[in-house]
Image (cartoon, coloured by chain):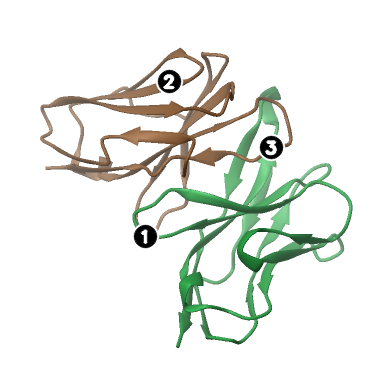
Amino acid sequence: ETGVTQTPRHLVMGMTNKKSLKCEQHLGHNAMYWYKQSAKKPLELMFVYSLEERVENNSVPSRFSPECPNSSHLFLHLHTLQPEDSALYLCASSSWGGWDEQFFGPGTRLTVL
Amino acid sequence: AQSVAQPEDQVNVAEGNPLTVKCTYSVSGNPYLFWYVQYPNRGLQFLLKYITGDNLVKGSYGFEAEFNKSQTSFHLKKPSALVSDSALYFCAVRDMTGGYNKLIFGAGTRLAVHP
């Protein structure tokens, strides 16, 4: 997990709160990803950024708002979440368009009360 | 659309025995396949990948995978399982739909290695 860091590792929030998840990669990659991992469900790709431009939004509700200010940093802004949004949120990075694998961070365990 | 399937939710094996975790794929074009492992409360760690070349791919921690084009399979294997191999394993396929690189993951297989 070295190379991609995520903060916080755990987050508990109420449905009316606003919070942000942060991801940072030190690998020189130019693509970054947000995934949602819920119990007993496949990994869901939420957002893809290439060269700081969003290239895919997999019909994610607007209560999730991504931000990629530069190629090393990725944020996921959260507001008015629902209890079903409780999950492990994983960030990943990779080279764009190459054959390289994606490198994942340790994830943020989010609980929405 | 590209997809992978992991037909087993869980695989149980005794320590020291060989293990196999199954994955089948459906792709248009050449498949680019990956295996990842996830330990509790951790992110996914890359194990190995198949891009082209030898059908037997060697990866981290003594794991290997066999690419079989006729059976559209990419099974993960290890000759002798360790208790520490107990984890969640994901197969994935590269998808270039839309002109950009993303991975499509299977549902995962939980491997339990018993002493």
Which residue is pictured at 69% across the width and 30% down the height? B97
Which residue is pictured at 66% across the width and 67% down the height? B62
Tell me: A98 left or right of B85. Answer: right
Which residue is pictured at 46% across the width and 44% down the height? A1
Which quadrant holds residue A16? Answer: top left
User: Front-most of A76 and B73?
Assistant: A76
Q: Chain of mark 1?
A: B
Task: Give neighbour class at mark 2: few <14, some 14-19, many 20+ (Cα, 10 Å).
Answer: some
Alpha-carbon distance for marks 3 and 2?
A: 19 Å
Mark 3 residue type: Asp
Which residue is pictured at 20% across the width and 32% down the height? A81
Q: Chain of mark 3?
A: A
**Discs 1 and 3 share one subunit:** no
Q: Is residue B1 visible?
A: no
User: Which numbered circle lies on residue A73?
Assistant: 2
Do the CB atoms of the residues marked 1 and 2 lie less than 8 Å apart? no
Write down which chain is painted brown.
A
Local SS, label 1:
loop
| Rendered view: B47 above or below A46 | below
